[in-house]
């Protein structure tokens, strides 16, 4: 099992500049936030987990919401979302090419 200290050491050893934190919100939707890696320390990990350690009802609600959201996913839905992202990227690249003449 990787500890917070191991993660902090890897961040420093590999000169990682940004960390993307992914989590499930109370409604079960996957979210993420990107932050500067320099802000990460063992205290930040402890702070993030403290609410869950102290509140079993919060853990239960978030767990149930995450499971409910996961059960709505199937490969057709996931693949459709990926295709939509690729189409937006293609459209934005074409628009950029028109604007810059490249």
Image (cartoon, rainbow, N blue to C red):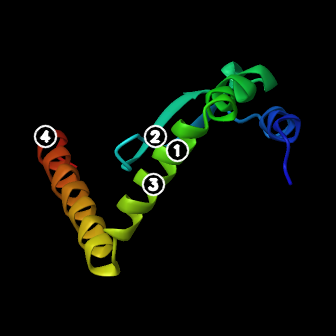
Q: Name the residue under label 1.
A: 22
Distance of mark 1 from mark 3, alpha carbons? 17 Å
Residue at the image point whose x is 84% and y is 49% from the top: 2
Viewer-nearest of discs 1 and 4: 1
Residue 30 % position (x, y): 41, 49
Q: Mark 3 points at which residue?
A: 64
Q: What is the quadrant of residue 81 in the picture?
A: bottom left
Q: What is the quadrant of residue 10 in the picture?
A: top right
Badge number at residue 99 = 4
Q: Is mark 4 on a helix, strand or loop?
A: helix
User: Mark 2 or mark 3, which is nearer the start of the sequence?
Assistant: 2
User: Mark 4 or mark 1, which is nearer the start of the sequence?
Assistant: 1
* Pick the front one: 78 or 63: 63
User: Mark 4 or mark 3, which is nearer the start of the sequence?
Assistant: 3
Q: Which image quarter holds the N terminus?
A: bottom right
Residue 17 % position (x, y): 65, 31
Distance of mark 1 from mark 4, alpha carbons? 34 Å
* Pick the front one: 99 or 1: 1
Residue 54 % position (x, y): 67, 29
Evaluate if marks 2 and 1 touch, with contact meaning CB atoms under 8 Å apart: yes
Whether residue 88 is visible: yes
Dot 2 alpha-carbon crowd within 10 angstroms: few under 14, some 14 to 19, many 20 or more: few
Residue 41 vs residue 89: left or right? right
Distance of mark 3 from mark 2, alpha carbons? 19 Å
């Amino acid at each position: 099992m990787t500890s917070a200290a191991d993660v902090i050491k890897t961040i420093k050893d590999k000169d990682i500049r940004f960390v993307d934190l992914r989590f499930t919100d109370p409604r079960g939707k996957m979210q993420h936030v990107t932050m500067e890696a320099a802000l990460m320390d063992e205290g930040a990990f402890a702070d993030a987990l403290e609410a869950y350690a102290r509140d079993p009802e919060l853990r239960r609600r978030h767990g149930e919401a995450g499971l409910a959201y996961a059960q709505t996913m199937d490969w057709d839905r996931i693949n459709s979302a990926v295709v939509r992202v690729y189409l937006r990227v293609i459209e934005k690249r074409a628009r950029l090419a028109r604007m810059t003449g490249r």
